[in-house]
Amino acid sequence: MNYRILLFYKYITFAEPQKFVEEHLKFCHEHDIKGRVWISSEGINATVSGLTANIEKYKNEISSYPEFSDLWFKEDPYFEHAFNKIHVRLKSEIVNASFGEVDLNKTGKYLSPEKLNELYESGKDFIIVDARNEYESAIGKFRNAITPKMETFRDWVKVASDLKDQREKTIVTYCTGGIRCEKASAYLVEQGFKDVYQIKGGIWNYIKQFPDKYWEGSMFVFDERRIVTPNKSEELKHIGECYYCGKKTSYYINCHNQVCNKMIITCHECKVTNDYCCCEGCRNSVNKRTAYHG
Ligand SMILES: [Zn+2]
Ligand SMILES: [Zn+2]
């Protein structure tokens, strides 16, 4: 475990993103840092991996920019790189919301993992809603959470509209590390929701502190780990259901018919039996991947 995976973001008005991209990419090449770093005038959003010593230098480097001096680095130990390459890109938004400008000074209030537990234990009526996509919530969610069928983050507009009769209620939003909820919760506030919270540090922060509690199943991650399974107890370990046999699992594949490419949650046995395909048609397709079945 001599590698680290770092997750961090910050929304900030950033003056010279292009200059930063060039300097940053150079630094990453020199220190064997891999992963994805999105930069825009609205801030930074990154997941990277590297040797622990290099990650320490990387943190110092980023923090040397006054704009990023107070970044919160979320760290996981790992045994190798979690990415193949480094991508440092200039984007129009660090999270593609496409639902227009929201006022990031008027987001939902931060709710710590401890306070979320207290809320569950208080018996108070509240709504907890997943701000991630359906393929993420299919393998893990908070207890009693609403898991909207979102294909992309843009669908949050519809989620807010579906919840509009509940505007007086306490609403808690969550996502992987918190970045999407800054916008998602701000959007709810803007739409007139009265008591909006976002989980501080997202699922990542919660499961680190409270495994086997109110988080059920696995967390989808955007690096080579693909999933993180924090719970030990049998009933909370997996909540996803095998597409073929219904067995509980968190594992998923994309259908090997490249034209289909549908994401399927599957147990290992059914994956092999079905030749990595979602249906008969895909199994017989000329577009089926023939490469090795890893
Ligand atoms: Zn199965
Ligand atoms: Zn298919």
Image: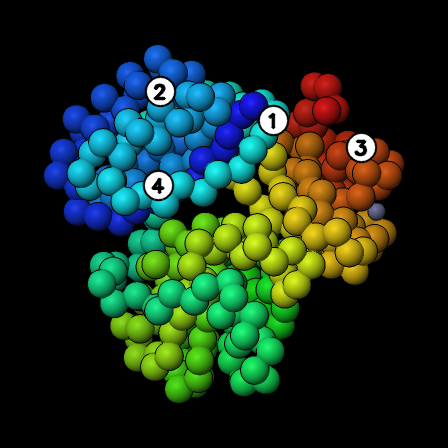
Q: CA distance from mark 2 to mark 3?
A: 39 Å
Q: Along the horizontal axis of the image, is 213 left or right of 249?
A: left
Q: Colour mode?
A: rainbow
**Disc 2 or 1, which lies upstream in sequence?**
1
Residue 282 % position (x, y): 73, 37
Q: Residue at x 51, y 30 (%)?
A: 4
Cβ of mark 3 under 8 Å from ligand 2: the answer is: no
**Nearer mark to the viewer, of 2 and 1:** 1
Question: With respect to residue 109, does 221 lie above or below?
Answer: above
- The picture quadrant where one finds residue 164 is bottom left
Q: Determine crowd level at label 1: few under 14, some 14-19, many 20+ residues with C-alpha closer than 10 A.
A: few
Q: CA distance from mark 4 to mark 1?
A: 24 Å
**Disc 4 or 1, which lies upstream in sequence?**
1
Cβ of mark 2 under 8 Å from ligand 2: the answer is: no
Label 1 is placed on what type of residue? Met
Q: CA distance from mark 3 to mark 1?
A: 34 Å
**Nearer mark to the viewer, of 4 and 1:** 1
Q: Along the horizontal axis of the image, is 30 left or right of 242?
A: left
**Nearer mark to the viewer, of 2 and 3:** 2
Q: Which residue is mark 2?
A: 28
Q: Which residue is mark 4?
A: 45
Question: With respect to residue 19, does 109 lie above or below?
Answer: below
Q: CA distance from mark 4 to mark 3?
A: 37 Å
Secondary structure under the numbered disc 4 in the rendered image: strand
Identify the mark at residue 1; answer none if there is no mark. 1
Q: Which residue is mark 3?
A: 275
Residue 272 % position (x, y): 83, 33
Residue at the outermost left position: 15
Q: Along the horizontal axis of the image, is 15 left or right of 155?
A: left
Q: CA distance from mark 4 to mark 2?
A: 15 Å
Question: With respect to residue 12, does 111 lie above or below?
Answer: below
